[in-house]
Amino acid sequence: MISRNLINKTIAYFEKYSNESFVVTPSLPILYFGDLSAYQNSELKVITVGKNPSSIEFSKTKEDENFSFFRFPLWNNRQYNLVEALNEYFEVDPYMKWFSCFEPILKGMQSSYRSVDGYPNIALHTDICSPLATKPTWTILKREQQKSLFEEGFEIWKELIEELQPDVMLISVPRVLLHGIAPTGKELITFDKTKNGGKRKTTYVVTEHIYPLRSGKVTKIIFGQAANKPFDTISSEQKVEIGQTIINNFNL
């Protein structure tokens, strides 16, 4: 379970920034996406990592500003039942246009965000910069806005990872964020073909890193360059190959 201390810290962080013009209103702090209980019961514990939640988690389209909790129908903003509301995300109305970018890698690892896919391991998604949805997107936020949100948001993420104790983290964010937690790494697998089978101008390199936890456990980090979306410039088949390589190389 997620500790009450971490939940309280996340709620306090949300309340601190919820009235800022760049934070989606109404919204809730998305500490993680997915079924926590199913994740904890999985033999292989996999977490994916992005920057921060999209405003589209609270709207039907990017242009729509009629924000609501339709993806989090169990949310009660008086009770702050965060875990209950977040656990149902992938069973209700997930924004799969974005999360589908990670799914082929997960499937190569016999994992998925969704129980309906039938894989034995259930993954969670987390965000390294902040659990708060912003509009504009993180990249377009002013530097001082990013800095303000990141200072506490990053600490919340690190505490979350300590509690979740993942075996593997799949990360596709700007390299500067990766280097903040894992400055060195080595090549895991490369691709010199595009999605369409043509020759790539630049080889796509997937790297492996380590992230030591306070418990003594060492989590594997797998990093791939993002584009508009995670691992966005390689094919689904190549992503499956990444997942299979992770399993084979690390005897998971």
Image (tube, grey):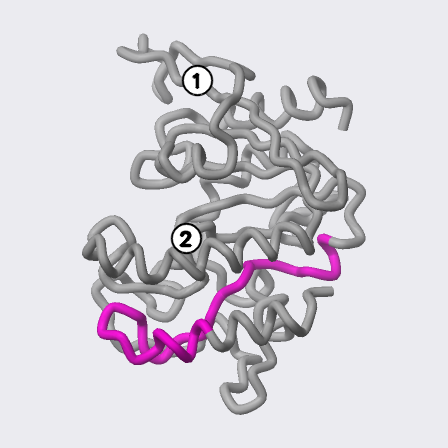
- For residue 48, which quarter of the picture? top right
Earlier sequence position, callout 2 versus callout 1:
2
17 in relation to 251, above or below: below
- Residue 72 or 47: which is nearer the viewer? 47
Give the residues in magenta: 13-39
User: Disc 1 designates what residue?
Assistant: 205
The residue under the point 40% across, 75% down is: 27
215 in relation to 206, above or below: below
Q: Is residue 14 magenta?
A: yes
Q: Which mark is residue 129?
A: 2
- Residue 16 or 55: which is nearer the viewer? 16
Q: Quadrant of the N terminus?
A: bottom right
Q: Amino acid at mark 2?
A: Cys
Question: Position of 41 compared to 101: left or right?
Answer: right
The residue under the point 19% across, 56% down is: 142
Query: Could you say where residue 247 lies in the image, as x and y percent from the top left?
Result: 70, 25
